[in-house]
């Protein structure tokens, strides 16, 4: 939909409570992936076998390489129970860690962004117009 755009909102970064981490051992990561991709093979000593390949325009993960499979960011979010597709992957001491920013899909109205705008003095119509570019607000009784 044309009104569903990614928008930046000042003050939104202050909401650090939406940062989270998911850490898995190599065996746990492989077991979760094998539930869906039974033929998956990962060389954990090869840095190229676990890496983010592509990002969306809003800097969320579009595609991740896990060994012999390329998996969408939304599917990775689902498989590993991540709060968002805005994540980084690090390997440390035999573990794989997903460091996640935010909570949600990244399109539409951000609750933390709306709260930040309200605290800066924006009213509800200003906030709606900020997140939904080009929409028109009308009284329901005025609709034909």
Image (cartoon, helix red, strand yellow):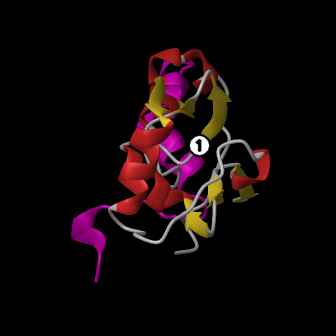
Q: Answer whether residue 138 is magenta in the image.
A: yes
Q: Quadrant of the C terminus?
A: bottom left
Q: Residue at x 55, y 65 (%)?
A: 72
For the residue pair 97 and 87, the one nearer the viewer reads as 97
Q: Residue at x 48, y 48 (%)?
A: 128
Tell me where residue 115 sits by quadrant. top left
For the residue pair 18 and 67, the one nearer the viewer reads as 67
**Vertical order, 144 against 64 (above or below):** below
Tell me where residue 4 sits by quadrant. bottom right
Q: Residue at x 42, y 35 (%)?
A: 111
**How many numbered marks does the figure carry?**
1
**Vertical order, 26 against 7 (above or below):** above
**Image check: 110 left or right of 139?**
right
The magenta segment is: 116-144
**Vertical order, 17 against 60 (above or below):** above
Residue furthest to the left:
141
Residue indicated by mark 1:
86
Q: Is residue 114 visible?
A: yes
Q: Residue at x 48, y 59 (%)?
A: 74
**Vertical order, 111 against 78 (above or below):** above
Q: Secondary structure at mark 1?
A: loop
Q: Residue 116 appears at what percent x and percent y?
A: 52, 23
Q: Residue 53 appears at what percent x and percent y?
A: 74, 59
């Amino acid at each position: 939909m044309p009104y569903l755009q990614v928008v930046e909102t000042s003050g939104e970064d202050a909401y650090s409570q939406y940062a989270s981490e998911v850490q898995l051992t190599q065996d746990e990561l492989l077991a979760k992936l094998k539930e869906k991709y039974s033929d998956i093979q990962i060389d954990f000593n090869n840095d190229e076998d676990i890496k983010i390949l592509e990002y969306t325009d809003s800097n969320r993960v579009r595609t991740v390489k896990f060994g012999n499979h390329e998996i969408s960011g939304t599917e990775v979010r689902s498989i590993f129970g991540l709060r968002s597709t805005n994540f980084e992957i690090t390997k440390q001491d035999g573990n794989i860690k997903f460091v996640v920013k935010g909570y949600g899909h990244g399109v539409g109205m951000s609750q933390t962004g709306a709260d930040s705008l309200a605290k800066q003095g924006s009213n509800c119509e200003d906030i709606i117009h900020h997140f939904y570019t080009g929409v028109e607000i009308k009284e329901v009784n005025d609709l034909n």
